Amino acid sequence: METTQQSEHQLHSATNGQSTPEPAVTIPAEHPLKTSNHEPLTTNVGQPIATDQNSLRAGERGPTLLEDYVLREKLQHFDHERIPERIVHARGAAAHGFFQLYDSLEDLTTAKVLTDTSAQTPVFVRFSTVAGSRGSADTARDVRGFAVKMYTTEGNWDIVGNNIPVFFIQDAIKFPDLIHAAKPEPDREIPQAATAHDTFWDFISLTPESMHMVMWIMSDRTLPRSFGMMEGFGVHTFRLVNAKGESTFVKFHWKPLLGVHSLVWDEAQQIAGKDADFHRRSMWDSIKAGNFLEWELGIQTLPEADEQKYDFDILDATKLWPEELLPVRRVGKMTLNRNPDNYFAETEQVAFNTTNVVPGIDFSNDPLLQGRNFSYLDTQLSRLGSPNFTELPINRPRCPVSNNQRDAQMRHTIDKGRVSYAPASLDGHSPDEVTPARGGFVSYPASVNGPKVRARSQSFDDHYGQAKLFWNSMSGSEKEHIVKALQFELSMVETRTVRQRMLKHLLQINHVLAEQVASALGELVADGHNPAQSRGTADSIAGVHLLAGATSETTASGGVQQSKALSMQDQPTSAKGRKVAILVANDVDSWQVATLQEALQRAGSKSDLVGLHIGRIQGHGGTLEVTKTLANSSSVLYDAVFVVGGPGAAALQHKGDAHVFVAQAYKHGKPVAATGEGVDLLTAALPTEAFHHKLGVIAEQHAAHQQQAIKQFVDIVGTRHWNRPDLEHV
Ligand code: HDD
């Protein structure tokens, strides 16, 4: 039976032609839910089906009959199950939740969602990668989409953002070129979900405006640890408009309460093979376990009068507003607390649109935004097949909808009456326009004048200034990761002139950066030094120091030379939302396993017992339930590793897979701990320096101190240790 809060039909009677108009049936607050537990099996028109195991045929060994409408209906429906995947952001995962405002922003806007602190606004948020197909891996190096749909009382408000605050291009007319260059190359359909190929870097190296974005995508920001550990950005400058009709420019931010954290490239590549669903699984599991994902909504505001105040143009989507100039004010919190019921109906069919704004929120003239304002509706029409896609449960506003739009494919609403036009005087007449005083949307009356030109303002011309700001703001190890990412990506480019063109751009951003990248490409940078000889990267620690000191004078940044907000170095860390591998074997200390698991659970971490086989094993002091094996998991799927002591732990020392497990965790900067006999595995698998420096490696042989070791470990579960020596030799 259908469990539904929806009435039989959606009936609109505002245009009712009968003498007594019937009240409009309000749109259901939620979507119809259907479960199929022990219900009678039927055809799509409700005829009970007696057998679904065999088609209708002439004789048991004879041909299938055309008459078999049950077979035909089932196959026909199946044959049409797919819809076109999104041209970009095809791979995504989503969750439901709500937004709650802290303080009213009525001095800035009339939008009820930003003025009513008592309202809990339902939200649906979809995270995505950009370039890969629907079946590609979650951990590809890529920008992440961060699309928020708020079902406000004044209509749907979508912030269709990314986890990076700037974009590749300044004008939407370049978007198809950018995406064609990034997607698999058209003759060979290679590579999938990767920018490390010729066409991407060819386009980028010929598009200097992309250089700021290039620094972001080559940083660890494109390797998020989880969706809940990413920032979100509306990217463009929007407007807030208050009751007096005054406009304030605004940028929207989502700040994760868990802090911003990332994987490393080697790890991300391995995860793509070990668990291509790493991010969606992590979000699903967290929400299911009651560890909800939380962000604060932040706003940066700029008075209309200050539009031209800075040396960057606020209409240029390749520029951010440094938080040192315009601080982020946190105004509310979004919580994702419910997994979707059905991937296709919700996550696949959700349709975001940058034009979905509410009264009190308006657009700026950012040419990228203006183009997007055309593209999203257009794409939904081909993706979802009909202008009635707004009637799909996931897209339907939770406030009344009423207008004279009619018909088209798959119309669900049954509009009653004779009137579907305005003005109309027949009884029932058209829905009334809403005056601004009663909350009707009016566009901010910005003055516009100028000749019609296909040209960009000179104020968009600085392409390197904020790339330098981003570079300067990175810690030494963050810079090292950028260098390595560029070395990797450009070394995959087959065409030498493209690689060389990119080096010229990098040279404009920072000399040391360009030299270090050039060293991996066998190139000399412009001044003729052989970088491989002059500034080798063989000693990683020395390389990090060198990079930390390498800065460039910024421009287009309001004078800001370095911005703390751009680095992930000092982000809050905790065990919350993390996952720990506990390596076990027969006869390990069961009491210690239980103590550790409890401590981790209290701290908000999930843990798996990883052993030589799944199922029950006999621990020292009790049985243990092992859920993962060294063969079916890997340290890359965890944030930290603990090897539990006890007489049986010695067995792990002789397992190659166990060595690889802890050695890789060490290489990726993760906390590694062992107690009692478990320490032998660390001694065998890790370099001797690992213990001397105590850099996130806890080795506690004495039974009396094991409690203390567990506490220390839980405290650092969420921390990566980038300054470990000798990583290249692990
Ligand atoms: Fe876009 C999808 C974010 C520029 C055209 N975009 C899409 C999604 C996100 C973004 C998060 C996925 C929404 C979902 O989960 O369904 N896009 C951005 C950001 C941009 C941006 C932050 C720059 C600031 N996009 C952009 C431009 C254009 C598009 C300049 C075209 C002129 N984007 C699309 C699209 C998509 C899309 C083709 C594909 C699927 C969809 O819209 O629904 O229309």
Image (cartoon, helix red, strand yellow):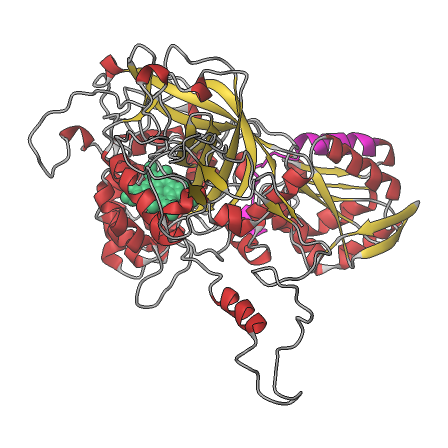
In the image shown, does 428 or 455 lie closer to the viewer? 428
In the image, 660 versus 259, the foreground residue is: 259
Q: Is residue 601 above or below residue 322?
A: below
Side (left or right) of 502 relative to 535: left
Res 7 seen here: yes
Residue that appears at 61% across and 37% down: 338
The image shows residue 214 at horizontal and vertical percentages of 33, 42
Could one spot residue 195 in this view of the protein?
no
Which residue is painted at 28% across and 19% down in the image?
A: 559
**What is the residue that sits farthest to the right in this orientation?**
621
Ligand 1 picture quarter: top left
Taking 491 as reference, is 431 above or below it? above
> Could you say where residue 66 lies in the image, as x and y percent from the top left?
52, 80
Q: Is residue 481 left or right of residue 285?
A: left
For the magenta stretch, what is the residue range?
705-730
Q: Is residue 718 magenta?
A: yes
